């Protein structure tokens, strides 16, 4: 078996690895580190949770150990799709570079530009950034990328999903063509294949697992869910989720619940807290300090259940997550792989349970087609309530039935030809008009009227 001591890494880096408790590299690390140390471009394809982050941080620290950073001109650049993933990469550099004098800066949203500008002005060896914030600094004239020697693109397929590919292409154009490029992704969509063909030069391709596969250490299951009524779907689905959590008992040491929408993340977290579960929400709309506080609580074990949107699916590195629950079936089959990859990491066992409604069956079929495996179905732990039969109507007492009877309608009153009212009583008297009571002057002829 290959050991880290066989990979020609810097002795100070090896010391940090030993102190972190690692002895043997994962397959992606064993395959990517040697060509990276040779200065070659690397294209790494591996499922989430296989140690991709260390496969580029370790050779970068070794290569950058000699040299000096210049103001506003970082020596290396690591691009990440989310703030959480960028923070995770920064933690890896802190762990493995603690015996090497390297400076780093983290450029992510939610932090003031002033603090980040101060770090860049001093000069950094490693710049870790999300694409948007990096370009913001560049356009403000605070950053030059002409000194980049090593460039890393992490979770490239997630970059594609989030619409960052045009930004990635622009950033590539701002860096020297002589740079070394390390490109990592869990899947290889056609658009990503095009970018690698354009910007990588004869890369060493390391593919340690079938594209878009889930770890074999993860036990997967699906619960079919059908609401009794459409307007009760949300509450009944949350009831199923609570029943699944309760059924796992003490085996659930900590877990992540994934929802498709941010609003559902908040609703689900509030509902769990209402019923006494130790849960908190994390999604893109939360303040960065609040997100980091929640993540820190989940990492140190003070928070048991994390309710998250897909923003955390690739940026959360907690090796001992015991369970993942998909409250919603993800719209993209690849996201399912990344979600459940939060458990069963580093050879540990994990469990992933998905709640699937009738309208999600097509998406579930796409997931099974992608992972080339049929996921076992579990029985819904919440039994549907039996429909209540309507009691036969009791016969009403005769007195009440008479009260309910409508009174006989009176004959419609006849319309009168006289009077201004709509209806009036008919009179037997003769109509007084212009007959017998004709005034005498009207009966006179015209000539007689003139003469008079």
Image (tube, rainbow, N blue to C red):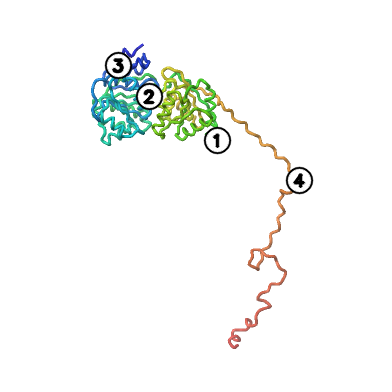
Describe residue 230's horizontal placement relative to residue 157 as left or right.
Answer: right
Q: CA–CA distance between discs 4 and 1?
A: 42 Å
**Mark 4: secondary structure:** helix
Outermost residue toward the bottom in this view: 451
Q: Tell me where residue 301 appears, x and y as whole percent.
A: 45, 23
Give residue 306's mark: none
Q: Quadrant of the N terminus?
A: top left
Give residue 398's mark: 4
Q: Residues within 10 Å of mark 4 (few under 14, many from 20)?
A: few
**Mark 1: secondary structure:** helix
* Mark nearer the N terminus (2 vs 4): 2
Q: Are marks 2 and 1 in contact (CB under 8 Å)?
A: no
* Mark nearer the N terminus (4 vs 3): 3
- Residue 49, image quadrant: top left
**Mark 2: secondary structure:** loop
Q: CA–CA distance between discs 2 and 3?
A: 30 Å
- Residue 425, image quadrant: bottom right
Observer-nearest of 340 and 304: 304
Q: Tell me where residue 203 appears, x and y as whole percent.
A: 29, 22
Give residue 186's mark: 2
| Residue 99 appears in the figure | yes
The residue mark sitting in front, 4 or 3, is: 3
The residue that disc 1 covers is 232
Q: Tell me where residue 222 appears, x and y as whole percent.
A: 50, 25
Observer-nearest of 160 and 174: 174
Name which residue lies at 59% across and 30% down.
Answer: 384
């Amino acid at each position: 078996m290959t050991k880290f001591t066989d990979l020609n890494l810097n002795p100070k880096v090896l010391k940090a690895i030993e102190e972190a408790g690692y002895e043997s590299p994962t397959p992606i690390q064993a395959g990517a580190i040697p060509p990276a140390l040779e200065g070659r471009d690397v294209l790494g394809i591996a499922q989430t949770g296989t140690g991709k982050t260390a496969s580029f941080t370790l050779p970068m620290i070794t290569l950058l150990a000699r040299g000096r950073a210049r103001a506003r001109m970082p020596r290396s650049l690591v691009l990440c799709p989310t703030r959480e993933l960028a923070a995770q990469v920064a933690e890896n550099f802190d762990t493995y570079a603690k015996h090497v004098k390297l400076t780093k800066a983290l450029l992510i949203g939610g932090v003031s530009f002033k603090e980040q500008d101060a770090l860049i002005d001093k000069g950094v060896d490693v710049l870790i950034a999300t694409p948007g914030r990096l370009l913001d600094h560049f356009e403000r004239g605070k950053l030059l990328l002409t000194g980049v020697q090593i460039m890393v693109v992490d979770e490239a397929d997630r970059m594609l999903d989030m619409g960052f590919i045009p930004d990635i292409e622009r950033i590539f154009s701002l860096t020297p063509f002589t740079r070394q490029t390390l490109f990592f992704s869990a899947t290889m969509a056609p658009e990503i294949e095009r970018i690698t063909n354009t910007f990588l030069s004869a890369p060493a391709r390391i593919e340690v697992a079938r594209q878009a596969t889930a770890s074999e250490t993860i036990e997967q299951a699906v619960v079919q869910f059908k609401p009794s009524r459409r307007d009760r779907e949300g509450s009944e689905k949350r009831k199923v989720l609570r029943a699944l959590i309760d059924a796992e008992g003490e085996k659930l040491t900590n877990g992540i619940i994934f929802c498709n929408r941010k609003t559902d993340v908040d609703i689900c977290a509030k509902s769990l807290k209402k019923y006494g579960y130790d849960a908190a929400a994390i999604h893109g709309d939360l303040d960065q300090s609040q997100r980091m506080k929640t993540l820190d609580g989940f990492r140190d074990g003070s928070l048991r259940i994390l309710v998250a949107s897909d923003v955390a699916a690739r940026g959360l590195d907690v090796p001992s997550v015991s369970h993942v629950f998909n409250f919603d079936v993800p719209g993209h089959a690849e996201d399912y792989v990344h979600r459940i990859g939060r458990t069963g990491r580093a050879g540990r066992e994990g469990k992933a349970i998905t709640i699937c409604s009738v309208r999600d069956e097509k998406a579930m079929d796409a997931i099974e087609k992608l992972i080339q495996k049929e996921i076992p179905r579990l029985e819904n732990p919440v039994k549907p309530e039996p429909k209540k039969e309507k009691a036969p109507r009791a016969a009403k007492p005769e007195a009440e039935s008479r009260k309910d009877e409508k009174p006989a309608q009176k004959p419609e009153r006849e319309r009168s030809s006289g009077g201004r009212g709509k209806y009036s009583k008919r009179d037997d008297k003769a109509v007084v008009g212009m007959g017998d009571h004709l005034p005498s002057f009207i009966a006179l002829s015209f000539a007689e009227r003139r003469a008079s």
